[in-house]
Image: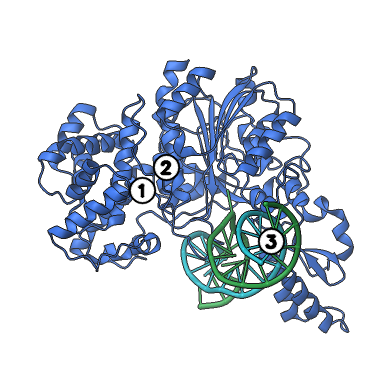
Chain colours: A blue, B cyan, C green
Amino acid sequence: MGDDSSLESDNFDWNTDDELEIESFNSLSSTVPSRQTITAASVEASSFAGPSNTKVLDHFISMGFPGEVVSKVIQEYGEEDEDKLLEEILTYSALESSSQQHQQVEPDPTSSEYAGSSWDDLSDGDSFSDEEMPKSVSRNDDTLLSLVNMGFKEEEALMAIERLGLDSSLDDLVDFIGVAQLVKEEDSLLPPEDKQQCSGHSKPRKRSLYEYEVLGKKKRKVSDKRTPCEEEDDGQTLNLPNPMMGFGVPNEPKSIITHRTLPENAIGPPYFYYENVALTPKGVWQTISRFLYDVQPEYVDSKYFCAAARKRGYVHNLPIANRFPLLPLPPRTILDAFPLLRKWWPSWDPRKNLNCLQTVHGSAQTTDRIRKKLESCEEFEEPSESVKKYVLEQCRKWNLVWVGKNKVAPLEPDEVEMLLGFPRNHTRGGGISRTDRFKSLGNSFQVDTVAYHLSVLKEMYPNGINLLSLFSGIGGAEVALHRLGVPLNNVVSVEKSEVNRNIVRSWWEQTNQKGNLIDIDDVQQLDAERLEQLMSACGGFDLVVGGSPCNNLAGSNRVSRIGLEGTESALFYDYFRILDLVKAMAPRFQ
DNA sequence: TTAATGATGACGATAGCG
DNA sequence: CGCTATCGTCATCATTAA
């Protein structure tokens, strides 16, 4: 249901412009369940104000929370914002937990559905094995000891054990504590004690509330019937829009949609712009979207902007009317981008666009194998069908281009730079290796695409903006805004890689920026306290941009494509955490 | 001499679509 | 079912630095 037009589900106008209706989008929307439908199916904790109180109540009770706590919290906070409710319930439960008996929040670990999610436990299970531990009181002690050894506070560990039960795995306990910590920090906007976790980076500490919700729901379902996983997909199928043009792209005026309705608590400022790969494992975008205030993703393939494909989802609360592209418009075909290749491009290679630019490139072996295959049928007009098929398959897989007689080769870093919309030599110098250039570029934004989306900010902020850029990488957002002519007043850039920080810093100085660039090493150290300092120093942020790591989501990952809860990709929850803090603190810095 | 860094190539699965 | 695309990881070797 990634269909963009599902946003039209209600009629609240916030911008009464002409409504440019697109047939294809509309016809898609009718086949797609509306958000209300999904909410009713209790897949998500939507912020939608449901008509019936009992539904919300049941939803939380089905997740394993005690009814009286749920109703108490609902009474106090209303039922509009289920995310907030969940937080409150968790917090409340945590406070009460000392006097409570063992509560079962987690589904029965022996249930078959639970086993279905064991990819999670298998993949990041460390040395602690459940089988080795007898299910007894000593197990309780051992688990407690393990958690304390991992750096958690004893009361946190005890609370988690009480909440989840003795039989739950260490992983789940760690997750639970992580979520509780996250919620806690969210809850008190004042600086919390930041010495709460161990310094080790062994495992993702932040799991989603989603996991608990989904498992809780499945537990309920599985009790009456064990359904095969392919049946009733829970609305988790994505249905990526085809063509993947989001709310529209330049050069395709017919595709442009100028109006959408955002959920109430998603409306900015502050504006936010989140990016990740479009082709994720099932359910990932639903989770992302739900955390980001139920804003539906805008899926865009950058092949409509440049000569290379780049299928990405963007969740943002920016206006979508009156976008404009960066000029000059970049070349849209391979040969327009690289005219010299025409000389060697065979007529039987129909490619007009490159595939996604990734972090690694094809090997010389592949080039060699292709040359040998082609030479073997040099006596004929054209290679045989099987050879053509093999060569095209390899060329598409590795994004190879024709650079000589029977010779294909991967792109150079300079060429990738150009395709992605960065200035020439943006990633060159500063002691960065060629391999790392490929990696940094492969992880980056396509500047023209992002700039098109951000272009609406230009007239809104003629005096410049304050930007919080998480997971900045080589500064795709900064470059995009700069090329748009949006002055950058204060930029806080969070990026783990030192070479990337150097690249951004170097670009910042070369382009004679008037503002201030502050760079931070790690998102984890950007807590409420630090954020408050930064915001009071520069007067709040107008825009929060970030594309969190896709390592555990990307299709090319054969090893650890385990979804949003993977070590790197779970950093999405830090994006959410920080964005939520910025939103909550924004009124104080107007 | 060893240690750190860079470069290389082998390694399928998932999910959407017709 | 067949077809296609996919911001990647890891062990290992080569090279450079210490």
- Residue A437, above or below A524: below
- Per the image, label 3 sits on a secondary structure element best described as loop
Question: Amino acid type of disc 1?
Answer: Arg
Marks 2 and 1 in Cβ contact (< 8 Å):
yes
- Residue A504, above or below A354: above
- Taking the image as drawn, is residue A178 in sight? yes
Q: Label 1 marks which chain's residue?
A: A
Q: Where is residue A559 in the image (x, y as percent from the top left)?
A: 50, 65
- Per the image, label 2 sits on a secondary structure element best described as helix
Image point 64% across, 33% down: which residue? A478
Q: Where is residue A485 in the image (x, y as percent from the top left)?
A: 70, 26
The lab-note entry on whether marks 2 and 1 share a chain reads yes
- Per the image, label 1 sits on a secondary structure element best described as loop
Q: Label 3 marks which chain's residue?
A: A
> Gap between marks 3 and 1, in whole Å?
33 Å
Among the two numbered marks 3 and 1 on one chain, the one whose residue lies closer to the N terminus: 1
The residue at which mark 3 appears reads as A361
Question: Amino acid type of disc 2?
Answer: Tyr
Question: Amino acid type of disc 3?
Answer: His
- Residue A346, above or below A290: below
Among the two numbered marks 2 and 1 on one chain, the one whose residue lies closer to the N terminus: 1
The residue at which mark 2 appears reads as A573
Image point 21% across, 51% down: which residue? A164
Question: Mark on residue A207?
Answer: 1
